[in-house]
Image (spheres, rainbow, N blue to C red):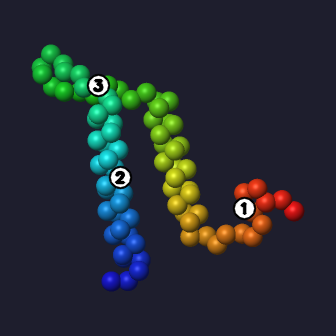
Amino acid sequence: MNLRTRVMIIGGVLGALLGVGAAYLYLRSAPVEVDEEGKERLPAIQPGKALTATVGVLTVLKQITGLGQPQERGRGRGRTR
């Protein structure tokens, strides 16, 4: 198995675990409503909260893609010349 395949498999497993964990946390925090027919329903997600979560996920993805880039010299935190 080559490196690319191993990275994809590990990333897929980690992504699945994070997704299940996020769903678990969401279900614990959201109140479950029961309608007249006895069906359980979750309340609608507010668009502002969905947008905030989406921007957070995109920020994390951008940081992950930056992990493979070589670090530029002289651009560390707090360094002045």
The quarter in which the N terminus is drawn is bottom left
Which image quadrant is residue 14 in? bottom left
> Residue 6 at x, y = what percent?
36, 75
Q: Is residue 56 left or right of residue 76?
A: left
Residue that badge 3 annotates: 31
Give the label, 3 or 1, closer to the camera: 1
CA distance for labels 3 and 1: 44 Å
Residue at 33% across, 36% down: 26
In the rendered structure, the answer to whether residue 16 lies left or right of residue 81 reads: left
**Residue 18 badge:** 2
| Residue at the bottom extreme, as displayed | 1
In the image as oriented, which residue stretches furthest toward the left? 37
Mark 3 or mark 1: name the one nearer the start of the chain. 3
Q: Amino acid at mark 1?
A: Gly
Q: Residue at x 79, y 60 (%)?
A: 79
Looking at the rendered structure, the kind of residue marked 3 is Pro
| Residue identifier under label 1 | 76
Tag 1, which secondary structure?
Answer: loop
